Each structure stands twice: as structure tokens, then as C-alpha cells.
Amino acid sequence: MKKFLIRIGPYFVAVVAVLAVLGSYADGNTDDNYMHFAVERPQNIILGDSRGAQGVVPGVLKSKLSKKFDNFSLNVVESPYGQVYYKALKRKLDPDTKNGIFILTVSPWTLSLNKNIKNAKDYPEAHSPLNDMYTYDRSPNYEYLLKHYTRSWFKIYTEREEAVGKSNSFLHEDGWMEISVTMHKDSVAARTAKKIEFYEALAQQVELSQERMKVFDEMINYLRTKGTVYLVRIPASEKLMAIENKKYPHFSNLLQDISRKQNVKLLDFSQNYDDYRYTDGNHIYKESGKVLTSRIADSISKRLK
């Protein structure tokens, strides 16, 4: 056995060295989550699902508020409000934060749960990388790659931004998920039809979760000790908002109640859905996202004065 280990030792070292080199090329093209775990801990943060990930642009906030922001929004499956997200937030946020600005994008879907789920181990985010990652500020982050990158590591090198340019879904270092798709009306209509079908089915399966609401409240309490909290309801297209409002007709009122109770500012854009373009009815197109973010920044700026 000793001789065998001596013989394979050099091969093992060589493999580890190759993987280490390949992993060093991981970037915003690697997958839709890697960069969330490969940057310095932020003091100003954006939370939420994929609406927030695509619709709130940290670069716009930085230019208007002179503060660096990190968009720590993933999607409705991996980052709904709950214990997993709360735990990840505490690991992600700079522990020395004192005067941070925290933008919590919220939709009824981020506070909902399948009616048939009873145990925390069955929550969808139980399989999220947020549930098992410990390091959020390592570059390269080999923990993430070993746990959650399932493709050949040679793809990391061959598909890196420097080699092929930005992918259609490119995760920037500041956490903004930039989606580049054709905005031809027929393509948008086809994608929107799929989203309508998805959310009509989802509406039949879920209800607002008291557990998610409780943890959401705890997250706000935690962040208030470190800065200023803003709740933001991002719109979707008219047809998607119709599904949302039919299922949850009093959701905006609920957010108003939370904002009053917690003494935080609510920015509700859900009635202004016609002001923006959408890639699929559910997500704001990147150029419209810059407009929305600018309006968020203006509201924050007024309150800071």
C-alpha cells in the first residue's frame, strides 16, 4: 500500500494543481451563483429573488449614492426569506457594518411556501448553496466549486469571460445578474406565456408562510441594528401582476403594515408596471432595471438628506 501511495502521489498532486489553476479562472460566466461567494463582504446589500437580482443594479446605486452595493439576490427557490437566507446573510455581510443601506426586494412568492410542506428539511432552499456554504469572500472559492460546480472544470477556463465574452446570464462581481436576450416581441411573448403558465400553477400550490414572515421580520430587526432598511416591491408585467394580485390582493397593505411596525421605508412600484419592459413578463429588462434602480436611489437619497 505504501508503494502504491508513493506511485500515485505525483499524479494526485498534478491533478490538484490542474484543478487549482482551472478554478482560478472562475468568473461571472461560471454559473449563476459563483460570484456571490467570491467577493469581499459588503456593507450595503440588496436581498430578494430573481426579480431583485436582475432589476436592481448596484452600479446605478453606487453612482447616485456614492456607496458600493452588493446584490445578494438569487431566485425564489434558492433565496426566499427564511432561516437559510438569514443564516447566509449573517455570513455574507461585513460584521463591522454600522451605517449600511439594505434594500429588501419582496414579492408574495418570496414569503410563500407550498401548502404540503411541513418540515424545514423539505423547504426548497434546503438544496440552495446558501444552506451549506461557509466562505463568502474567497476568490477563487474552491469550497463553492467543489460543492456546487457539477460540470468539467475545463469549462471554467474555456467559457471564461476573457475567452468568450459575457454569457447570456452574466453575474457581475457586484451581484447584478445581467440577462441578455432578444427583446423581439414574439420572443418576449413566448417567454411570457411560459411564465404565466408557471405562476398560475404556483398560485394553486402555495400560501403565505407564517414562518417566512417571522424570519423576514427577524432579518429586518437584525439589519436595523446595522443601518437603514428599505422594502421594495418590484413590478412584473400586467398579466403577471394580475395573477399575483388575484392570489394576494392585500399584499401591498401587508407590506405597509410591516413598514409601519418596523419604522422602515416602503417603496412600492407594483402599480407602475407599464413604466418598464420585461424579458419574460416576470423580470425587468436590464435597461428598465437601471431606470427602476435610479428611482430607488432617488428615494433613498431624499431620505438621507
Image (spheres, grey):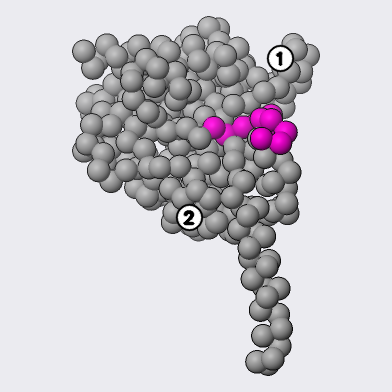
In the foreground, 42 or 204:
42
In the foreground, 41 or 194:
41
Count of labels shown?
A: 2
Q: Quadrant of the image for the C terminus?
A: top left
In this view, 304 is above or below 7:
above
- Place of residue 286 in the rendered image (x, y in percent of width and height, measured from the top left): 58, 19
Q: Quadrant of residue 185?
A: top right
- Place of residue 201 in the rendered image (x, y in percent of width and height, measured from the top left): 65, 33
Task: Please give the residue where the numbered disc 2 appears in the rendered image.
Answer: 133
In the foreground, 143 or 161:
161
**Residue 282 appears in view:** yes
* Farthest-out residue, top: 275
Query: Does the magenta run of residues contain 170?
Result: yes
Residue at 39% over, 29% down: 69
- Place of residue 34 in the rendered image (x, y in percent of width and height, measured from the top left): 56, 44
Q: CA distance from mark 2 to mark 1?
A: 36 Å
Task: Please give the residue where the numbered disc 1 appears in the rendered image.
Answer: 183
At label 2, which amino acid type do we have?
Answer: Met
* Farthest-out residue, right: 186
Q: Name the side, left or right, on which 167 lies relative to 48.
A: right
Q: Which residues are magenta?
A: 162-172
**Residue 129 appears in view:** no
In this view, 84 is above or below 80:
below
Disc 1 residue crowd, few under 14, some 14–19, many 20+, Cα 10 Å: some
At label 1, which amino acid type do we have?
Answer: Met
Is disc 1 placed on a helix, strand or loop?
loop
Residue at 44% over, 18% down: 60
Q: Name the side, left or right, on which 268 lies relative to 276.
A: left
* Mark 2 or mark 1, earlier in chain: 2
Q: Name the side, left or right, on which 259 lies relative to 166.
A: left
Disc 2 residue crowd, few under 14, some 14–19, many 20+, Cα 10 Å: some
- Place of residue 277 in the rendered image (x, y in percent of width and height, measured from the top left): 60, 12
